[in-house]
Image (cartoon, rainbow, N blue to C red):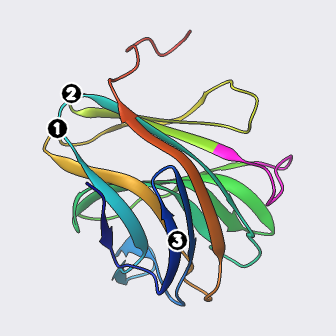
Amino acid sequence: MLTWLNEPAEWAGDAADLTLVTAKGSDFWRTTFYGFTRDNGHCLLSPVSGDFSASLTVTADYAELYDQAGMMLRIGAQYWIKAGIEYTDGLMHFSTVVTNGISDWSVIPLPEATPQTPVSIRITRHDDAVRIQFHLGDGHWQMARLSPFPADAATIGPMACTPERAGLKVHFRDFTIGPAISRALHD
């Protein structure tokens, strides 16, 4: 069962094919560097427990600083991971924020990507570790992050936010949750 955290005013569809439009000032962040806490981004979340892999594909009209869309894994306001595309410095980046009381941020520049480039994201949990991967339509999964994360019951699903503006139109497709992929990191 999917439930909204901060339901956007405009959305349509379901996990297989979802479109939403972001609200102004929507974001997920806790304290680090900027000194503020925001927990008002948009997520459509499904419960998960144990080991799993979840994936989806996203496209959006990224154009403004910090426009972002991807996937959220969440235990609560203090423990979450968001991973996906973030537009910063005039370029799409694969971005991961891991929050354990406070947020960190890492990015991988994607100079070959355009807003029309579909980006697939996969989050896998094995015990108390989470692997975050992505690909740009070529089917080759690239690891972006391996992070500790509590093995507690959580929720996961599509996420989007725009800290600096309103109106980012995001399209998610093929959101699935299933058994965890192999633990092999190098295949």
Instruction: Give the quarter of the image for residue 48.
Output: top left
Residue 160 as seen in the image, left or right of residue 42: right
Quick one: quadrant of the N terminus? bottom left
Near-viewer residue (13 or 123): 13
| Segment colored magenta | 110-119
Instruction: Give the quarter of the image for residue 88.
Output: bottom right
Closer to the chain start, of discs 1 and 2, is 2
- Write down the residue under mark 3: 12
- Write down the residue under mark 1: 151
Residue 125 as seen in the image, left or right of residue 28: left
Quick one: quadrant of the C terminus? top right
Instruction: Say what secondary structure mark 1 lies in.
Output: loop
Q: What numbered label is drawn on residue 127?
A: 2
Q: CA distance from mark 1 to mark 2?
A: 6 Å
Q: Residue at x 64, y 85 (%)?
A: 167
Rendered location of residue 152, percent (x, y): 13, 43
Question: For mark 3, does the 10 Å Cα neighbourhood hold few (<14), some (14 to 19), or many (20 or more) residues?
Answer: few
Q: CA distance from mark 2 to mark 3?
A: 34 Å
CB under 8 Å between callouts 1 and 2? yes
Rendered location of residue 156, percent (x, y): 33, 51
Closer to the chain start, of discs 2 and 3, is 3
Residue 83 as seen in the image, left or right of residue 1: right
Q: Mark 2 is on which residue type?
A: Asp
Q: Is residue 127 above or below residue 20?
A: above
Q: Residue at x 84, y 50 (%)?
A: 111
- For residue 175, say whether it is visible: yes
Camera-side mark, 1 or 3: 3
Question: For mark 1, does the 10 Å Cα neighbourhood hold few (<14), some (14 to 19), or many (20 or more) residues?
Answer: some
Q: CA distance from mark 1 to mark 3?
A: 32 Å
Q: Mark 3 is on which residue type?
A: Ala
Closer to the chain start, of discs 1 and 3, is 3
